[in-house]
Image: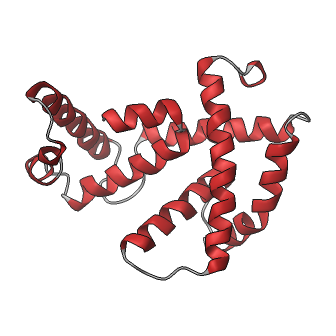
Amino acid sequence: MIIAREKRRNNIAEYVLYMWQIEDLIRANELDMQRLHATVIAQYRQDTETTAEIDRWYAELVEMMLTEGVREQGHINIVRIAIMQMEEIHSRLMADPKEMIYQGLYYQVLPAIVQLRAKSAGSNTGEIETCLTAIYGLLTLRLQKKEVSEETLASIKQMSTLLSVLSEKFAAREEGTDEALL
């Protein structure tokens, strides 16, 4: 909760990836608050008040996952909305002639995006979500100690750079310091 709030404010891409990890952590604990408390919340080692706040946050996430029908897969609405906002800013940056650096980064990543989208035929995800999914997939593969090709790592690095710039633009919009994106 504390980490999520900080990531939401400072780096929207990291926030989305973190929230996907939290969703998977909740699923791994079968949306059971007692298990979550024992395996996750107790590990935070915070004072009683902060622990209670973290506990409430996880309980709210569990409730959202149940209510929104994402018990086994998918993402809660607050995360999907963040992704939609990222996609919107991406579209604006692509249409802005002053954003040549961002556009250049995008065109470097585009072949990898096209390739990933072709592999997930039938998936109706946007380009930014495709990048996020690729990065999350890499994180998952690393946790499983599986090998990843140099080509994949290079593509993921480009995607990370694009998302980093997008996150900076997102933060500027949230702070009201980038009038073009307001």
Furthest toward the right, the residue is 97
- Confirm whether residue 126 shows in the render: no
Left/right of residue 73 with respect to residue 118 in the rendered view: left
Rendering quarter of residue 46: top left
Q: Position of residue 98 (x, y in %)?
A: 89, 33
Left/right of residue 96 with respect to residue 83 in the rendered view: right
Please tell me whether residue 35 is drawn above or below residue 174 in the rendered image: below
- Colour option used: secondary structure
Question: Residue visible at 35% across and 43% down?
Answer: 68
Q: Position of residue 82 (x, y in %)?
A: 53, 37
Work out which quarter of the rendered image holds the C terminus and state it.
top right
Question: Residue visible at 63% across and 32% down?
Answer: 170
Q: Position of residue 131 (x, y in %)?
A: 62, 57
Between 163 and 68, which is closer to the camera in this rendering?
163
Between 95 and 11, which is closer to the camera in this rendering?
11
Question: Residue visible at 18% across and 43% down?
Answer: 44
Question: Residue visible at 78% across and 52% down?
Answer: 105
- Confirm whether residue 65 shows in the render: yes
